[in-house]
Amino acid sequence: MFGYIHANRQEMSEPDQKTYKSYYCGLCQALKRMAGMKGQVLLNYDVTFLCILLSSLYETENRVETFSCKVHPLSRKCGFISPVIDYGAAMNILLGYHNLMDDYLDNGNRKKKALADSLQKTYEKIRQEYPRQARAIEAFMDKTRKAEERHEENVDILSGYTGEMLAQIFLMKEDEWKEELMNIGFYLGKFIYMMDAYEDREDDDRHARFNPLILKYRECSQCYEAFMEQSLTSLVEEAAKSFERLPILENASILRNVLYSGVWDRYEYLKIKSGRKKNEQAGKER
Protein backbone atom coordinates (compact mmCIF):
# COMPACT_ATOMS: atom_id res chain seq x y z
CA MET A 1 0.00 0.00 0.00
CA PHE A 2 0.96 3.67 -0.57
CA GLY A 3 2.90 5.28 -3.41
CA TYR A 4 -0.12 6.43 -5.45
CA ILE A 5 -0.13 10.15 -4.59
CA HIS A 6 2.62 11.46 -6.85
CA ALA A 7 3.15 14.10 -9.52
CA ASN A 8 2.84 13.87 -13.28
CA ARG A 9 6.26 15.30 -14.07
CA GLN A 10 5.63 15.38 -17.82
CA GLU A 11 3.06 18.13 -17.21
CA MET A 12 5.24 20.11 -14.79
CA SER A 13 7.25 23.24 -15.52
CA GLU A 14 10.99 23.00 -14.96
CA PRO A 15 10.91 25.19 -11.81
CA ASP A 16 8.11 23.02 -10.35
CA GLN A 17 10.04 19.85 -11.16
CA LYS A 18 13.07 21.25 -9.36
CA THR A 19 10.99 22.22 -6.30
CA TYR A 20 9.23 18.83 -6.21
CA LYS A 21 12.58 17.05 -6.39
CA SER A 22 13.98 19.22 -3.59
CA TYR A 23 11.12 18.17 -1.30
CA TYR A 24 11.57 14.52 -2.27
CA CYS A 25 15.34 14.62 -1.70
CA GLY A 26 14.89 16.63 1.50
CA LEU A 27 12.52 13.96 2.83
CA CYS A 28 15.04 11.29 1.88
CA GLN A 29 17.80 13.07 3.83
CA ALA A 30 15.50 13.59 6.84
CA LEU A 31 14.82 9.84 6.86
CA LYS A 32 18.58 9.23 6.75
CA ARG A 33 19.15 11.55 9.74
CA MET A 34 16.44 9.77 11.73
CA ALA A 35 17.12 6.15 10.83
CA GLY A 36 20.13 5.88 8.53
CA MET A 37 20.00 4.18 5.14
CA LYS A 38 17.30 1.79 6.35
CA GLY A 39 15.05 4.81 6.83
CA GLN A 40 15.67 5.94 3.26
CA VAL A 41 14.31 2.62 1.98
CA LEU A 42 10.88 3.71 3.23
CA LEU A 43 10.80 6.94 1.17
CA ASN A 44 7.50 7.40 -0.70
CA TYR A 45 5.73 10.00 -2.82
CA ASP A 46 2.59 10.16 -0.66
CA VAL A 47 4.57 11.71 2.21
CA THR A 48 6.34 14.03 -0.25
CA PHE A 49 2.90 15.40 -1.17
CA LEU A 50 2.11 15.84 2.53
CA CYS A 51 5.36 17.78 3.06
CA ILE A 52 4.60 20.12 0.15
CA LEU A 53 0.99 20.60 1.28
CA LEU A 54 1.84 21.45 4.90
CA SER A 55 4.90 23.55 3.99
CA SER A 56 2.82 25.58 1.53
CA LEU A 57 -0.13 26.02 3.90
CA TYR A 58 2.02 27.17 6.82
CA GLU A 59 4.49 29.02 4.56
CA THR A 60 7.39 27.21 6.17
CA GLU A 61 10.86 28.51 5.39
CA ASN A 62 12.96 25.80 3.75
CA ARG A 63 16.74 25.73 4.12
CA VAL A 64 18.57 24.27 1.13
CA GLU A 65 21.04 21.46 1.74
CA THR A 66 23.44 20.07 -0.87
CA PHE A 67 24.66 16.50 -0.51
CA SER A 68 26.05 13.56 -2.42
CA CYS A 69 23.65 10.72 -3.22
CA LYS A 70 24.67 7.07 -3.62
CA VAL A 71 21.85 6.51 -6.10
CA HIS A 72 23.05 9.44 -8.25
CA PRO A 73 26.79 9.68 -7.45
CA LEU A 74 27.88 11.81 -10.43
CA SER A 75 26.40 15.09 -9.20
CA ARG A 76 25.50 16.76 -5.93
CA LYS A 77 21.81 17.00 -5.07
CA CYS A 78 19.72 19.67 -3.36
CA GLY A 79 17.09 19.06 -0.71
CA PHE A 80 14.97 21.16 1.63
CA ILE A 81 15.29 21.08 5.42
CA SER A 82 12.43 22.21 7.68
CA PRO A 83 10.38 21.13 10.72
CA VAL A 84 7.56 20.11 8.36
CA ILE A 85 9.85 17.81 6.40
CA ASP A 86 11.07 16.32 9.68
CA TYR A 87 7.41 15.70 10.58
CA GLY A 88 6.91 14.02 7.21
CA ALA A 89 9.93 11.79 7.79
CA ALA A 90 8.60 10.77 11.21
CA MET A 91 5.22 9.86 9.69
CA ASN A 92 7.00 8.02 6.87
CA ILE A 93 8.79 5.84 9.44
CA LEU A 94 5.60 5.13 11.41
CA LEU A 95 3.78 4.12 8.23
CA GLY A 96 6.74 2.24 6.79
CA TYR A 97 7.29 0.20 9.95
CA HIS A 98 3.71 -1.05 9.97
CA ASN A 99 3.77 -1.69 6.24
CA LEU A 100 6.83 -3.92 6.72
CA MET A 101 5.19 -5.78 9.59
CA ASP A 102 2.02 -6.23 7.55
CA ASP A 103 4.02 -7.78 4.70
CA TYR A 104 5.69 -10.11 7.19
CA LEU A 105 2.38 -11.20 8.73
CA ASP A 106 0.78 -11.68 5.31
CA ASN A 107 3.60 -13.41 3.46
CA GLY A 108 6.15 -14.43 6.08
CA ASN A 109 8.74 -12.17 4.46
CA ARG A 110 11.67 -12.39 6.90
CA LYS A 111 13.65 -9.61 5.20
CA LYS A 112 10.78 -7.21 5.86
CA LYS A 113 10.61 -8.36 9.49
CA ALA A 114 14.38 -7.85 9.90
CA LEU A 115 14.12 -4.32 8.51
CA ALA A 116 11.16 -3.56 10.78
CA ASP A 117 13.12 -4.86 13.79
CA SER A 118 16.06 -2.62 12.90
CA LEU A 119 13.69 0.39 12.96
CA GLN A 120 12.13 -0.53 16.32
CA LYS A 121 14.04 1.98 18.48
CA THR A 122 13.42 4.83 16.05
CA TYR A 123 9.77 3.85 15.79
CA GLU A 124 9.31 3.88 19.58
CA LYS A 125 10.95 7.30 19.85
CA ILE A 126 8.64 8.75 17.18
CA ARG A 127 5.66 6.98 18.74
CA GLN A 128 6.30 8.83 22.01
CA GLU A 129 6.65 12.17 20.21
CA TYR A 130 3.49 11.71 18.12
CA PRO A 131 1.16 9.46 20.17
CA ARG A 132 -2.05 10.52 18.36
CA GLN A 133 -0.71 9.63 14.93
CA ALA A 134 0.88 6.40 16.17
CA ARG A 135 -2.38 5.29 17.80
CA ALA A 136 -4.25 6.05 14.58
CA ILE A 137 -1.92 3.83 12.55
CA GLU A 138 -2.06 1.03 15.11
CA ALA A 139 -5.88 1.21 15.21
CA PHE A 140 -5.97 1.14 11.41
CA MET A 141 -3.80 -1.98 11.29
CA ASP A 142 -5.93 -3.73 13.92
CA LYS A 143 -9.27 -2.83 12.29
CA THR A 144 -8.05 -3.81 8.82
CA ARG A 145 -6.69 -7.17 9.93
CA LYS A 146 -9.91 -8.03 11.79
CA ALA A 147 -11.99 -6.97 8.79
CA GLU A 148 -9.92 -9.18 6.49
CA GLU A 149 -10.27 -12.12 8.88
CA ARG A 150 -14.06 -11.81 8.82
CA HIS A 151 -13.94 -11.25 5.02
CA GLU A 152 -15.60 -7.85 5.18
CA GLU A 153 -17.05 -7.23 1.70
CA ASN A 154 -18.00 -3.57 2.12
CA VAL A 155 -15.26 -1.67 0.35
CA ASP A 156 -16.47 1.62 1.81
CA ILE A 157 -15.87 0.36 5.37
CA LEU A 158 -12.42 -1.01 4.54
CA SER A 159 -11.24 2.07 2.66
CA GLY A 160 -12.65 4.19 5.49
CA TYR A 161 -10.13 2.67 7.90
CA THR A 162 -7.26 3.93 5.72
CA GLY A 163 -9.01 7.29 5.42
CA GLU A 164 -9.41 7.68 9.18
CA MET A 165 -5.75 6.89 9.70
CA LEU A 166 -4.42 9.24 7.01
CA ALA A 167 -6.68 12.03 8.28
CA GLN A 168 -4.70 11.96 11.55
CA ILE A 169 -1.39 11.94 9.67
CA PHE A 170 -2.39 15.00 7.62
CA LEU A 171 -3.28 16.83 10.83
CA MET A 172 0.14 18.00 11.97
CA LYS A 173 -1.36 20.41 14.51
CA GLU A 174 -4.83 21.34 15.72
CA ASP A 175 -5.77 24.72 14.25
CA GLU A 176 -8.30 26.44 12.00
CA TRP A 177 -7.33 24.24 9.03
CA LYS A 178 -8.04 21.00 10.89
CA GLU A 179 -11.24 20.05 9.06
CA GLU A 180 -9.90 20.63 5.56
CA LEU A 181 -6.59 18.85 6.20
CA MET A 182 -8.37 15.87 7.74
CA ASN A 183 -10.76 15.74 4.78
CA ILE A 184 -7.88 15.68 2.32
CA GLY A 185 -6.21 12.88 4.27
CA PHE A 186 -9.46 10.95 4.65
CA TYR A 187 -10.42 10.94 0.98
CA LEU A 188 -6.89 10.34 -0.26
CA GLY A 189 -6.62 7.48 2.23
CA LYS A 190 -9.75 5.89 0.78
CA PHE A 191 -8.36 6.46 -2.72
CA ILE A 192 -5.08 4.74 -1.78
CA TYR A 193 -6.93 1.71 -0.39
CA MET A 194 -9.10 1.43 -3.51
CA MET A 195 -6.11 1.75 -5.82
CA ASP A 196 -4.12 -0.84 -3.90
CA ALA A 197 -7.03 -3.30 -3.98
CA TYR A 198 -7.56 -2.57 -7.69
CA GLU A 199 -3.91 -3.23 -8.51
CA ASP A 200 -3.80 -6.47 -6.50
CA ARG A 201 -7.20 -7.94 -7.43
CA GLU A 202 -6.12 -10.40 -10.12
CA ASP A 203 -3.08 -11.60 -8.18
CA ASP A 204 -5.09 -11.92 -4.96
CA ASP A 205 -7.76 -13.91 -6.78
CA ARG A 206 -5.17 -16.31 -8.23
CA HIS A 207 -3.62 -16.92 -4.80
CA ALA A 208 -6.93 -17.05 -2.89
CA ARG A 209 -6.07 -13.95 -0.84
CA PHE A 210 -8.71 -11.63 0.56
CA ASN A 211 -9.60 -8.60 -1.56
CA PRO A 212 -13.07 -6.97 -1.43
CA LEU A 213 -12.90 -6.07 -5.12
CA ILE A 214 -12.81 -9.74 -6.15
CA LEU A 215 -16.50 -10.05 -5.28
CA LYS A 216 -17.27 -6.73 -7.02
CA TYR A 217 -15.65 -8.03 -10.19
CA ARG A 218 -17.43 -11.39 -10.04
CA GLU A 219 -20.80 -9.75 -9.47
CA CYS A 220 -20.50 -7.67 -12.64
CA SER A 221 -17.25 -7.77 -14.60
CA GLN A 222 -18.71 -5.50 -17.30
CA CYS A 223 -19.58 -2.70 -14.89
CA TYR A 224 -16.47 -3.13 -12.73
CA GLU A 225 -14.32 -0.50 -14.47
CA ALA A 226 -17.15 2.02 -14.41
CA PHE A 227 -17.60 1.41 -10.68
CA MET A 228 -13.88 1.89 -10.05
CA GLU A 229 -13.61 5.05 -12.12
CA GLN A 230 -16.67 6.61 -10.52
CA SER A 231 -15.51 5.70 -6.99
CA LEU A 232 -11.95 6.95 -7.48
CA THR A 233 -13.11 10.15 -9.18
CA SER A 234 -15.53 11.03 -6.38
CA LEU A 235 -12.81 10.48 -3.74
CA VAL A 236 -10.27 12.69 -5.50
CA GLU A 237 -12.93 15.35 -6.09
CA GLU A 238 -13.72 15.51 -2.36
CA ALA A 239 -10.01 15.80 -1.49
CA ALA A 240 -9.59 18.52 -4.14
CA LYS A 241 -12.57 20.51 -2.79
CA SER A 242 -10.95 20.73 0.63
CA PHE A 243 -7.58 21.60 -0.91
CA GLU A 244 -9.12 24.48 -2.87
CA ARG A 245 -10.58 25.90 0.34
CA LEU A 246 -7.10 26.24 1.86
CA PRO A 247 -5.29 29.60 1.39
CA ILE A 248 -2.37 28.07 -0.50
CA LEU A 249 -0.51 30.15 -3.08
CA GLU A 250 3.04 28.79 -2.93
CA ASN A 251 3.47 25.49 -4.80
CA ALA A 252 -0.25 25.45 -5.68
CA SER A 253 0.58 24.38 -9.24
CA ILE A 254 2.56 21.37 -7.94
CA LEU A 255 -0.23 20.31 -5.58
CA ARG A 256 -2.85 20.67 -8.31
CA ASN A 257 -0.66 18.62 -10.65
CA VAL A 258 -0.70 15.79 -8.11
CA LEU A 259 -4.43 15.99 -7.33
CA TYR A 260 -5.74 16.54 -10.84
CA SER A 261 -3.25 14.51 -12.87
CA GLY A 262 -0.57 12.56 -11.01
CA VAL A 263 -2.93 10.42 -8.92
CA TRP A 264 -4.39 8.98 -12.14
CA ASP A 265 -1.11 7.80 -13.69
CA ARG A 266 -1.10 4.37 -12.07
CA TYR A 267 -4.81 3.82 -12.64
CA GLU A 268 -4.54 4.60 -16.35
CA TYR A 269 -1.51 2.32 -16.68
CA LEU A 270 -3.29 -0.57 -14.93
CA LYS A 271 -6.45 -0.07 -16.96
CA ILE A 272 -4.48 -0.17 -20.23
CA LYS A 273 -2.53 -3.21 -19.03
CA SER A 274 -5.76 -5.00 -18.08
CA GLY A 275 -7.34 -4.21 -21.45
CA ARG A 276 -4.24 -5.47 -23.24
CA LYS A 277 -4.42 -8.73 -21.28
CA LYS A 278 -8.08 -9.23 -22.21
CA ASN A 279 -7.30 -8.64 -25.89
CA GLU A 280 -4.46 -11.17 -25.76
CA GLN A 281 -6.69 -13.75 -24.09
CA ALA A 282 -9.45 -13.15 -26.63
CA GLY A 283 -6.90 -13.62 -29.44
CA LYS A 284 -5.78 -16.94 -27.97
CA GLU A 285 -9.37 -18.15 -27.66
CA ARG A 286 -10.01 -17.36 -31.35
Image (cartoon, grey):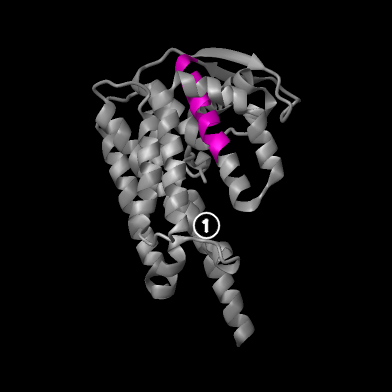
Can you identify the residue that label 1 sits on? Answer: 199
User: Is residue 246 visible in this depiction of the protein?
Assistant: no
| Mark 1 closeness class: few <14, some 14–19, many ≥20 residues within 10 Å | some
Q: Which residues make up the magenta segment?
A: 82-98
Number of numbered tags placed on the structure image: 1
Task: Pick the residue in front: 128 or 95.
Answer: 128
- Of 61 and 223, nearer the camera is 223
Regarding mark 1 in the picture, which secondary structure is present there? helix
> To which quarter of the image does residue 238 belong?
top left
Visible residue check, residue 34: yes
Which residue is depicted at the point 65% across and 32% down? 117
Residue 90, position as x, y percentages in the image:
51, 24
93 part of magenta stretch = yes
- Residue at 44% x, 61% y is 151
Q: Position of residue 175 (x, y in %)?
A: 27, 20
The answer to whether residue 32 is left or right of residue 240 is right
Q: Is residue 237 left or right of residue 208?
A: left
Residue 269, relative to residue 205: is it above or below? above
- Of residues 216 and 130, the one nearer the viewer is 130
Quadrant that contains the C terminus: bottom right
Under mark 1, the amino acid is Glu
Q: Tell me if residue 100 is in the magenta stretch.
A: no
Q: Is residue 63 above or below residue 148?
A: above
Query: Looking at the image, which residue is at 27% across and 36% down?
Result: 242
Residue shown at the point (71%, 41%) measured from the top left: 111
Residue that protrudes farthest toward the bottom in the picture: 286
Percent x, y of residue 195: 46, 53
Location of residue 175 with respect to 164 vertically, above or below: above
The spot of residue 169 in percent (x, y) is: 40, 31
Prevalent SS, magenta region: helix
